[in-house]
Structure formats: C-alpha cells, structure tokens
Amino acid sequence: MKLENTSEIIPEENLVMIVYGKGGTGKTTFAASAPKPLILDFENGSKYLGSRGISADVVRMDSWLTTDDKRDLMNLLKDHDTIIIDPLGEAMDKLIDSPDIKGLKYRTGDGSPTMAGWGEIKKQMRNFIKFLRDTKKNVIIVSHVAEIQTEQGLEHRIQVATKLSDEIPNMVDVISYLGVRKDGEEFKRILYTPAQGNGFDSKDRTSRIPTSVVIGEKTGWTDLMNAMKGEK
C-alpha cells in the first residue's frame, strides 16, 4: 500500500470523454482530430471522412466485439493513442443483439432483455469502457443527443439505453455537447461544457475546460487542448 498526497500526484495525460450532439455537427470529425486515432465505427459514419481529407484508422463494426475482436483490438492499440467508440447508441444496440444476450435467462418471450439481460448488457459495456480507460489512451465516446421537453424546458441528454444513462457518465472525465452557431455569415463549431444542469448532460473532472470552445473542423482536439492550457 502506497500513501500519496494529492499535491504530488501528476494528472495522467490521457482524456476519457463523451462528445454528443445532433447529426452533422462534426462529432466524428472532432474525435478523428485526436492523436493517432482508431475509430470503432458502429454506424459506418466514417465513410466520407477520407474524401474530406481526414485521415484516421477505422474498424467498421457490423456486430458487437467477439473474443477474437477484443484480442485483435489489444494489438491495434499498440499503434494508436486514441480509441473512439462511434456512436455509443449503435454500439449498445449491437451489444443487445449479440449472441452473448440470448436464451431464457436474458430474453423475455417478446425478445426484449430481462432484468438479468440488462444486467449482463450493463456489465459488458461497463467492462469494455473500463478496459479502454485503463489502457491510458485517450478515449472518445461519440453519442447522438436525445432532446427531451420537460417542465423546466428543453433538456439535452446523451442518447443511450435508459438502463445505462446513469452509469456511463460516471466512467469518464469530460462530457461535452458539440453544436453549431452562426456568427455573421460564418458557422462555427462550439464545444459546450457547462456546469451541471442548464439542460445539458455535462461534466469536467479536470476543471480546466472553458464553458465554450470554438473548434476548427480538423483542429478540434488541438483547440480543446489549447483551451485547457488557457491558450487561444
């Protein structure tokens, strides 16, 4: 057992984050701008990146990861600094439909997951994200947004199966909403990380991210890192 003082602990350089927002705002493009990215593409959303001059290694996932896939991923991670799940909701759907979640224990008569099935789904997704987090690589989880009208107004939530909505945020350092704002004749991408509340899922364990950061199409990650350092 090693005793340490918080004043002496140097924060790890990797960042584990969720970026979410509407379709077409540039979430995948932002993720691909991180160092040496590897995209686990569960939605085939990367197919046009190359034609737009964006270079990133991609594994197009037609189904949830098998044991062999996870072994291959271990080898691929050696040559990459960032791992991207794109998008979270589609990855969840493929996990729910996987051969691991079959049989009377995990399925009701109409095919939906039982309580035990949801428990297994949550365990597998939680363990996968923890595995990626513990590699000390950057981890970016891309998610669509669920807009929910409440008595308090319009809320913007990470789009994921409700059984996991309270668990996944606990495993990341940062949750940011990516939107587009018109500034005169120009449209700007804004990475928005407000204090919790304000109608947005949000989180900043680093306490170094400004509420809003303007990011470029191909420089998003660098722009975020500079903003965390207080640079413009």
Image (cartoon, grey):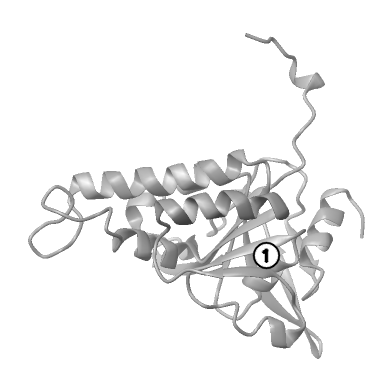
In the depicted structure, whether residue 177 falls above or below residue 80:
below
Give the quadrant of the N terminus: top right
Q: Residue furthest left?
A: 109
Report helix, strand or loop for mark 1: helix
Residue at 45%, 60% (x, y): give it: 152
Give the quadrant of the C terminus: bottom right
Residue at 39%, 66% (x, y): give it: 63
Left-right relation of 166 to 135: left
Q: Which of 214 and 6 is in front in this view?
A: 6
Residue 120 is situated, as x and y percent measured from the top left of the image, at 29, 45
In the depicted structure, whether residue 9 falls above or below residue 225:
above
Residue at 72%, 14% (x, y): give it: 4
Q: Which of 107 and 144 is in front in this view?
A: 107
Q: Which residue lies furthest to the right in this view?
A: 231
Can residue 81 be seen from the camera position used here? no
* Residue under numbered circle 1: 31
Q: Residue furthest bottom?
A: 185
Count of marks placed on residues: 1
Q: Nearer the viewer, residue 56 or 19?
A: 56
Residue 183 is situated, as x and y percent measured from the top left of the image, at 79, 82
Left-right relation of 35 to 19: right
In the depicted structure, whether residue 193 falls above or below residue 9:
below
Residue at 49%, 51% (x, y): give it: 70
Residue 29 is situated, as x and y percent measured from the top left of the image, at 69, 73
Question: The disc labelled 1 sits on which kind of residue?
Answer: Ala
Mark 1 is surrounded, within 10 Å at the Cα level, by few (under 14), some (14 to 19) or many (20 or more) other residues, namely many
Can residue 28 be seen from the camera position used here? yes
Residue 156 is situated, as x and y percent measured from the top left of the image, at 50, 64
Determine which quarter of the picture holds residue 217: bottom right
